[in-house]
Image: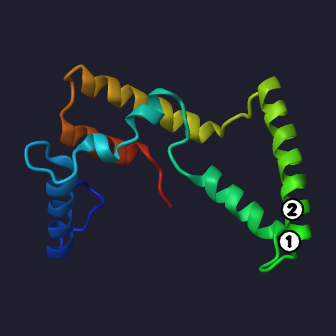
Amino acid sequence: MNKSTPHHHSSVKFNDHLLSTYVDSSSCRYPIHLWNVNDTVVNNLPRTNNHAEGYNSRLGTLFLTHPHIFRFIELLRDEHIFQHHHSAQSKIHALKRVTLSEDTNAQLLVLLNQHSNGQITDLQLAIQCGEAVKTK
């Protein structure tokens, strides 16, 4: 457990559960390669699905609950045109990612390299990645 986790029976039990389920490579239920974001960090891709959630929210604001079929088709056509232009713009210049996200990705990439070189263990990787990723 790290310095910010309270030493309470339930927090110790929860920490042990996380370690035995996800982190301890000798006995974990879900191997690290199933849930980690290693490939996304290495390939500089988004670590979350916020872009998909944003698109879903956008579609929710465009469409009424039960639009008339002709209105629905018209909105789909407009959305297609919008996305086509958006795609063309992104080919000209890539959208800039938030600096904090880039800094976090850089820290995670260093940790992944250290882990692949054997400098840190699975457990150390999990703890240090948790410290690198800022949460609210």
Of all residues, the one furthest to the front in this rendering is 69
* Amino acid at pointer 2: Ile
Density class for disc 1 (Cα within 10 Å; few <14, some 14-19, many ≥20) is: few
Q: Position of residue 113 (x, y in %)?
A: 33, 23
Checking the image for residue 73, the label placed there is 2
Residues packed near mark 2 inside 10 Å, few (<14), some (14 to 19) or many (20 plus): few
x and y percentages locating residue 56 in the rendered image: 68, 61
Q: Examine the image and state in which quarter residue 12 appears.
A: bottom left
Judge whether residue 107 can be spotted in this image.
no
Q: How is the image coloured?
A: rainbow
Q: Nearer the viewer, residue 82 or 109?
A: 82
Inspect this view and state whether residue 84 appears: yes
Residue 111 versus residue 20: which sits nearer the camera?
20
Query: SS at mark 1?
Result: helix
What is the quadrant of residue 38 in the picture? Answer: top left
- Residue beneath the point at 55% across and 52% down: 49
Please tell me whether residue 35 is drawn above or below residue 6 in the rendered image. above
Tell me the amino acid under the disc marked 1: Ile
* Residue picked out by circle 1: 69
Q: Residue at x 35, y 48 (%)?
A: 130
Residue sitting farthest toward the top: 117
Q: Secondary structure at mark 2?
A: helix
Q: Residue 135: horizontal and vertical position, in percent?
A: 47, 56
37 or 119: nearer the eye? 37
Residue contact between numbered discs 2 and 1, judged by CB atoms under 8 Å: yes
**Number of disc labels:** 2
Using the image as rendered, state which of residue 88 and residue 74 is in the foreground.
74
Image quarter hosting the N terminus:
bottom left
Q: Taking 37 as reference, is 12 above or below it?
A: below
Please provide percent x and percent y for residue 110.
38, 26
Q: Residue at x 24, y 54 (%)?
A: 2
